[in-house]
Amino acid sequence: MEVSRRTFIKTTLIGGAGVSVFGFNLAPVYAQTQGLKIARTTETRSTCPYCSVSCGVIIHTLGDKSKNAIPQVVHVEGDPDHPINRGTLCPKGASLEQDIVNDRRLVKPQVRRPGATEWEDISWDTAINEIARWTKKTRDAAFIDKDKNGYTVNRLETIGWIGGCTDTNELNFLAVKTMRSMGVCYFETQARV
Amino acid sequence: MTEWWDKQIRRADDLEAHANGSRELLRFYGHLLRAQKDIYEFLCTRKGWLPTGELEADFPILTEALPGFLGAVESHGPAPLAAEAHELCEANDEAVAERLMSYWLNASDIQFFEKAFLQPYLRWVAESGARPVRREVAGGERYCPFCGGNPQVSFLQNKETTAESGNRDLICAVCLSSWEFRRVVCANCGEERPTKLGYFHSPVFDHVRIEACDTCKHYLKSVDLTRVGFAAPLVDEIDAAPLDLWAREHGYTKIELNLVGV
């Protein structure tokens, strides 16, 4: 009788994992299996955000995909299959995990008042209101609609914007739209990749 | 030339001494490796002969190594394998050749004797520069580029001296040679979506993990040599047999069963 691989494995292994396909007693193996704590991770290929070299990275995320579980980044390594870096990373790239998971990361806005030596925690509402007030005040005071030759320029030279390398595309998109609409000239998103 | 086999045997002995659930499997695999090493040594020390890669032509030489191999399986294997080994000892050459040719043309992981007996032969074929004749090479990166076999196990190792991570290679279940394979890809169906690929790990087997695919529901195990450099993937894979049972309980099928049938 012709026995398929599937049937063969099914008949020898299912039902308490008694014996292996070739007749080995799997009871002790099965007993050890019961004590194992298994964690599921996902590997996602991505690009290091820090500079224009654009090294490939693999991000390891812990989480079993269950509904209420929040996936957590547990490791970031160079992508050995990436043609640019072939698994290597600079010290900044190698510490990328700490950019994502870091208990020293600021999670609320802070302000240092004129003359103060310490940073002060403020609420998001306060921060937004203060930024809006200062932006309007600065723009109203220094907006240039025409240059000395009478050409319309609509520019603002007293506000600048410096982006960060880990800013997302979406944030950079909004920053460009906002700054351009206000006439800001001194403007850098640091979008390299 | 036999250093590779010695390394596997040493590793099997070391792991067996500390093994928990898989001790019996490792003990048998250690004996099997010794028998395979004997075949390999017999073939590569034979004066004035090199393998042609054509099984039918090389069969008369190969059969000389068969009795020792079958004797080892009969002495150390579980009852079903010992009984089959005994039957094969008494079978005529034509019957044995027919079984080997059947495996040669269409390899299957449930054909223990054919797979175990031909592994050292094909390894020697690869090392001697010959090519296997009349073996269908399916093509595609998921099959061994030398003989077309399935992957038995994958392993990670640093190939760039400054690399932060390991390159992935697959070891062929048929000829034991290895080939490069991309990291985040299913070795069975080629799935690349990260959400469909799961990596399962237990601290008990810190350098071994299951690489499973939720699209085709297949898996293979991976041994991380960047963590344990002296590990032998084929042996460590057997030591981590509890992971296989866990994977099977969770609905995954192994791409290729190993020589202890898990």
Image (cartoon, coloured by chain):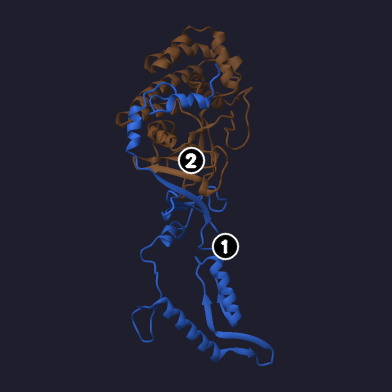
The foreground one among A187 and A52 is A187
Reply above or below: A54 against B64: below
Q: Please state the horizontal and vertical placement of residue A130, each as a whole percent of the image.
A: 45, 83
Q: CA distance from mark 1 to mark 2?
A: 32 Å
Q: Disc 2 designates what residue?
A: B212
Q: Please state the horizontal and vertical placement of residue A8, each as a whole percent of the image.
A: 49, 23
Reply above or below: A47 against B47: below
Q: Residues within 10 Å of mark 2 (few under 14, many from 20)?
A: many
Q: Residue at x 45, y 44 (%)?
A: B199
To which quarter of the image does residue A125 belong? bottom left
Q: Please state the horizontal and vertical placement of residue B5, each as a whole percent of the image.
A: 43, 26
Q: Residue at x 42, y 25 (%)?
A: A20
Q: Residue at x 51, y 15 (%)?
A: B46
Question: Do dots 1 and 2 share one subunit?
Answer: no
Is A116 on the left or on the right of A79, as rendered?
Answer: left
Q: Disc 1 designates what residue?
A: A193
- Give the label on residue B250, or none: none
Chain A hue? blue
Kindly identify the amino acid type of the residue bearing the numbered disc 2. Answer: Ala
Q: Which chain is brown?
A: B
